[in-house]
Amino acid sequence: MGTFLISDSLSNLYFEEDTVIDNDELHIMELATDIRNIRFKTPAEIADGAVESIQEDNRTVETFKVHERTVCRVKFSDVNAFGNGSPYSSSQVSKSLEQKINEDLGAQPDIQVERWVTAHVLLSTAGQIGGRTDDYWKRARSLAQQQIYLNPNLENEVKQQIDAGNHKKDPVFSKMLALVKKGCPMKGHNLYHQAKRNDYATTNGLLHKIENVDIVLVLDQSDNLILIQCSDVFKNLLTKAVHKLVVQSFETYSSLVPAPFPDMTRHGLHWISFLAERPDLDFRNPDNDPRVAKSGLFHIGARCEVGDPSGRKLPGPTKDNAGRRVPLRGDVFHQLVKLRYSAFGACTEISKFFFQILEPSLLQEYIRVADEVAKLDVPFATRRSGEPFLMRALLVNQMTYEHQDTGDWHHGFAFLLPMGDFSGGDLVLRELGLQVEAPPGCLQMFRGRELRHSITKWTGRRFVCVNVTHEAVRRWALRSLGEEVSGTPTSLAPSIMADCIDEEPEDVVPEDQREEEMYSWSYVSEEELEGSSHGGSEASLPSKADRKRTSTSKHRAASSSDASAEASDKDASSTKRQKKA
């Protein structure tokens, strides 16, 4: 698409009137019909010619053409998108792939090794690793995982030390190791190791790569939609000029308002590693132009706070929204309004087009929830009517590692629109054994809450607009409408990369608290914790008295796609007053 220049005035253009899809246009009607047929009919019924088919491990991949559009249809006969637990990782494709990677690369470092290194890290820093008390063990363990990641020989060295019983020779280390054992009772998700597995799978061609196609469709055993991707959606539904204006708006706004950067204690060393490989994006380099040297993400919309995964409290604006980081008066506020109804509005219009065709009933539920939240006057809308989404995440030149967007609508969808001038950035779905080429200007609609996803490395300048609504907000809206909602928190097992949250370092909530939501300490014994091989992260061990009684605390959920809940200063101070009382 060429280079997108930034306006010297740092002022966004207003092009809302150009972001409305004319559904009466013949070519748009034909596209809608093709999308509907591809989704609900068999390839034999709609293909222009022959259908190429590949079957392996309960997965069927069919490639064919429909009205000069190349389509790839993937169906799994052993995946239930609405199943409990991890429905995608239990597929035969996933099991075979993970076994192959284990044979070649090795399994995730043992918990005993991580505890050993964690104890050394804490002793070497005199226990001073920063952060809040209830975030302490996650940070400590993350630092240990970083050391194992940086030193490939460290794991074997530690195993030798453990076998030799070296800890018995040092009483101080033995005491620290005992503390770490209590603080890190369970096997946790190691994002460094998972990133290595993704790299190995893509580098060695272990994934089925889908490329040079116009439409990708992935279905489960009952033909429930898992993913659809459509290329050139701006050109087909709006115009290429609008695509260019959207990218220019993202460039301009992210220069006018500095993009918040991820907290490294949450996202680890990968973010820094990415900037080391892309020094042109490092805003800390004084030789770089600050208008183009940027890498971060915004969350603009409405969400519930940290500590409210069930939506008990009123939703409020995100930190990047008007009234928070953006003052309610002045030029920046007006630039944000332009961004919402023009650039974000175009992305919403396209997302809504596919939503209406593929899941019309669910779309109406999204709109119903958004209409109820709109009564709170939280600025989130990008359309004048029929707004379906409460949250926008804008990723600015970011690298996305494997994660689940565990704060998103339960069994809902995330809508992603990658755009800009880049190459690479393929969508990686390792649980499904798929690598999908994702060119600029495409739309992706998939179940990001339940399905782990990441991207391959990319070059150029890359923006991604993500449209979602959170489960907590949905639950609040249903209560407000007078409907009965279960009080059980709905967060899934944790992921350190989950949701790319834009919290301040002091607000970061350990992802291990999701473990508490799934497994009440009242029902999990120390012996069970010791032998647990659960893939989720560890949780700080409570006192015996706490384990004896049923937990009545309000759990905080680390968050989609990229966005999730955040704690307000007001709520934090209120909590402190309650504790004192």
Image (cartoon, rainbow, N blue to C red):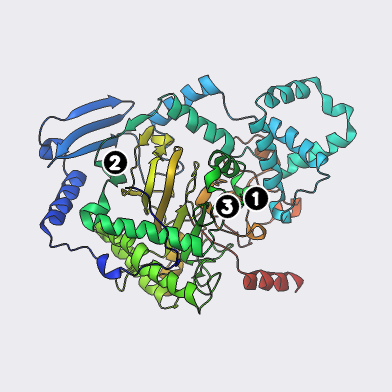
Q: Which residue is mark 3?
A: 283
**Mark closer to the observer (3, 2):** 3
In the image, taking residue 497 as reference, residue 225 lies left or right, namely left
Of the residues under marks 2 and 1, which one precedes in the sequence? 2
Q: Which residue is mark 2?
A: 219
Dot 1 falls on a residue whose secondary structure is helix
Give the total number of marks visible in the rendering. Answer: 3
How packed mark 3 is, by other alpha carbons closer than 10 Å (few <14, some 14-19, many 20 or more), is some
Does any portion of residue 106 appear in the rendered image? Answer: yes
How packed mark 1 is, by other alpha carbons closer than 10 Å (few <14, some 14-19, many 20 or more), is many
Dot 2 falls on a residue whose secondary structure is strand
Can you tell which quarter of the image residue 369 is in? bottom left
Residue sitting nearer the eye, 442 or 353: 442
Dot 3 falls on a residue whose secondary structure is loop
Q: Which amino acid, by three-letter code, is at mark 2?
A: Leu
Q: Which residue is mark 1?
A: 521
Residue sitting nearer the eye, 164 or 296: 296
The residue lying at 13 percent from left, 60 percent from top is 25
